[in-house]
């Protein structure tokens, strides 16, 4: 608590950073946290709340009450207003409704617009606050209007002016540094008529998939992108800070899916909910483990006749599993980044199979020598060496093809890939090792 007071006092005449305050709040216990929230300036408490994990939101609701929460929402940008209200709704739906009714009609309209989009559409992520100017407006008039809006706090983080016609259709995007080179006494149309191609906008449609919008930022090194509807009417913008958040969320989601857990359930504080989602994948994994055990059971007589096989079996399966996971992780991540196209699939499969084959040859020699010396059987080294080559080869092949196939079927390649791959490497590993042992050693 003292650290927060010290921070607020030391920044009394300078900008307060919500992320800094959130770091301090995370160190407090429950009672201190509720009291600390009340000390935060009302104009940034909403931003601070959004910097904190979801588990803190119930305490934030208790600390601020209806009036405090309403004021917090009013001081947020439209996209953050939607996110804030959704978090309040998860805690208390009736309270969220009261807050919404306390907002201005214009704010209600903007929030309703953003909530009308699907969660993966660009329109759901845009903010309606932006600065637009008419193509026939004088630059000096637009600058005066901009200055007035900026001083009143109605707009912030503006680096681009969106130029529209009299029907609000997007025509051009002009960075502020380019406007400084304009003749202020002339209209925007007069200033850009000889160089209009330079200001042609890179835009996204409101119903476009947000993943495609993320790729636009990467491909064109954007700091902001305008969002338009099918009639090219300017609706809002998405800024780079929102894109960074989306990228982080996608990366987290991908890691959770590869591990067979649900990202939303893991962020929830309900233990039973997270237990249920994890148990689903563990149950599937149990079935695949039983399948691998059935394969081992087929060679029970072979194992009984040579105990060394039981000692070496886990090595073959483990090496195949790890090699497959390496391939799977690389391919899933490249798919997420858009670095692999369908035409590129053959190249990726060849590359990953080649890497796995080379590693298979390398570790087949190493493990073959170790097994031969360990158990004083030269042919046992040959068996495990051949089995390791087969299993790593299959691991590379399926580690690459499984996510590519799932992507082709419009299924998230991270979901289920690990379970399928583990099944393949275990079954192939045990079958090849014990099968070769039965043929060669007995």
Image: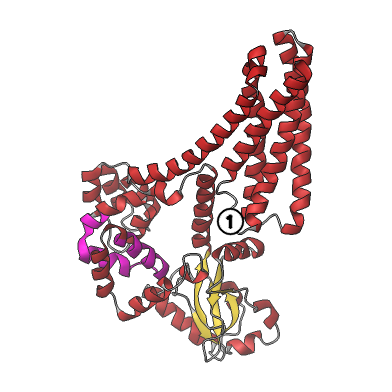
Q: Residue 323: x percent and y percent?
A: 67, 34
Q: In what quadrant of the picture does the N terminus appear?
A: top left
Q: Which residue is mark 1?
A: 411
Q: Residue at x 26, y 48 (%)?
A: 5
Q: Residue 414: x percent and y percent?
A: 57, 49
Left or right of 65 on screen, residue 112: right
Residue lying farthest to the top in this orientation: 376
Vertical arrangement, residue 8 with respect to residue 156, above or below = above
Q: Can residue 280 be seen?
A: yes
The residue lying toward the viewer, choosing from 20 and 90, is 90
Q: Residue at x 56, y 91 (%)?
A: 136
Q: Residue 341: x percent and y percent?
A: 71, 58
Q: Give the SS element for disc 1.
A: loop
Vertical arrangement, residue 385 with respect to residue 184, above or below = above
Please report the bounds of the magenta region as a residue range.
Answer: 60-89
Q: Residue 202: x percent and y percent?
A: 62, 73
Q: In what quadrant of the picture does the C terminus appear?
A: top right
């Amino acid at each position: 608590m003292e650290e927060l007071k010290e921070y607020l006092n030391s920044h009394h005449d300078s900008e307060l950073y919500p992320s800094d305050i959130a770091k301090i709040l995370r160190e407090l216990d429950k009672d201190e946290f509720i009291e600390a929230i009340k000390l935060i300036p009302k104009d940034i408490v909403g931003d601070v709340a959004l910097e904190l994990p979801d588990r803190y939101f119930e305490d934030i609701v208790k600390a601020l009450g209806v009036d405090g929460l309403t004021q917090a929402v009013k001081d947020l940008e439209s996209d953050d207003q939607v996110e804030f209200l959704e978090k309040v709704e998860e805690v208390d739906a009736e309270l969220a409704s009261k807050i919404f009714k306390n907002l201005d009609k214009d704010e209600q309209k903007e929030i309703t617009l953003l909530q009308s989009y699907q969660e993966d559409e660009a329109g759901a992520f845009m903010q309606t606050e932006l600065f637009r100017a008419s193509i026939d407006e004088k630059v000096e008039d637009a600058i005066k209007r901009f200055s007035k809006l900026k001083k009143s706090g109605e707009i912030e983080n503006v680096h681009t002016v969106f130029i529209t016609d009299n029907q609000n259709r997007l025509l051009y995007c002009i960075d502020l540094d380019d406007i400084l080179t304009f003749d202020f006494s002339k209209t925007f149309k007069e200033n850009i008529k000889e160089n209009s191609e330079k200001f042609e906008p890179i835009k996204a449609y409101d119903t476009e998939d947000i993943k495609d919008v993320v790729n636009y930022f990467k491909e064109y090194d954007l700091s902001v992108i305008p969002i338009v509807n099918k009639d090219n009417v300017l609706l809002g913008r998405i800024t780079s800070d929102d894109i960074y958040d989306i990228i982080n969320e996608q990366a987290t989601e991908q890691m959770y899916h590869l591990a067979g857990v649900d990202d939303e359930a893991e962020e929830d504080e309900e233990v039973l909910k997270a237990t249920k989602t994890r148990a689903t994948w563990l149950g599937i994994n149990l079935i695949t483990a039983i399948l691998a055990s059935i394969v081992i059971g087929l060679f029970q007589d072979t194992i009984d006749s040579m105990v060394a096989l039981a000692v070496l079996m886990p090595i073959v399966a483990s090496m195949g599993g790890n090699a497959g996971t390496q391939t799977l992780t690389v391919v899933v991540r490249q798919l997420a980044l858009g670095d692999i196209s369908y035409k590129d699939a053959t190249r990726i499969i060849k590359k990953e199979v080649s890497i796995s084959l080379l590693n298979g040859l390398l570790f087949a020699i190493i493990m073959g020598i170790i097994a031969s010396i360990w158990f004083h059987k030269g042919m046992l080294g040959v068996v495990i060496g051949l089995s390791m080559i087969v299993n790593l080869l299959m691991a590379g092949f399926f580690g690459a093809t499984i996510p590519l196939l799932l992507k082709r079927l419009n299924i998230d390649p991270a979901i289920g890939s690990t379970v399928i791959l583990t099944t393949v490497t275990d079954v192939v590993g045990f079958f090849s090792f014990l099968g070769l042992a039965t043929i060669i050693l007995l």
